[in-house]
Amino acid sequence: MKTTSPIEQEVNHIRLQIYEETKGLTPAQRAERTNKIAEATAQKYGFKVIASAKEPVQS
């Protein structure tokens, strides 16, 4: 019988937590939530979120 490592247990816990937070959301609401999280992360670490990899880089 395989035992689950502490790291895998933590990942599974996080996955279930995210599921519980998003299970009633529409696709648009889910996208809005993801974009909000991405913007906060980008601001925290100082990088820019772009809409597409094909978007030209502006300096």
Image (tube, grey):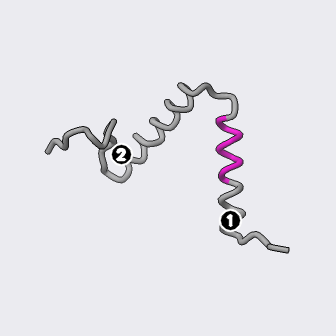
Q: Give the range drawn in magenta.
A: 14-22
What's the mark number on residue 8? 1
Question: Residue 43 magenta-drawn?
Answer: no
Q: In which quarter of the image is residue 43?
A: top left
Q: Is residue 30 left or right of residue 56?
A: right
Name the chief secondary structure element in magenta: helix
Element type where label 1 sits in the image: helix
Residue type of the residue flagged with mark 1: Glu
Q: In which quarter of the image is residue 19?
A: top right
Return the x and y of residue 31 as percentages of the image width and height: 51, 32
- Residue in front for this viewpoint, 56 or 43: 56
Q: Classify 10 Å Cα crowding around label 1: few (below 14), some (14-19), many (20 and above).
A: few
Element type where label 2 sits in the image: helix
Closer to the observer: label 1 or label 2? 1
Q: Residue furthest left?
A: 59
Q: Quadrant of residue 1?
A: bottom right
| Residue plotted at (79% across, 73% down) | 3
Return the x and y of residue 16 as percentages of the image width and height: 71, 48
Estimate the spatial distance between the alpha carbons at disc 1 and disc 2, rounded to whole Å. 29 Å
| Residue plotted at (14% across, 45% down) | 59
Q: Which residue in the protein does label 2 denote?
A: 43
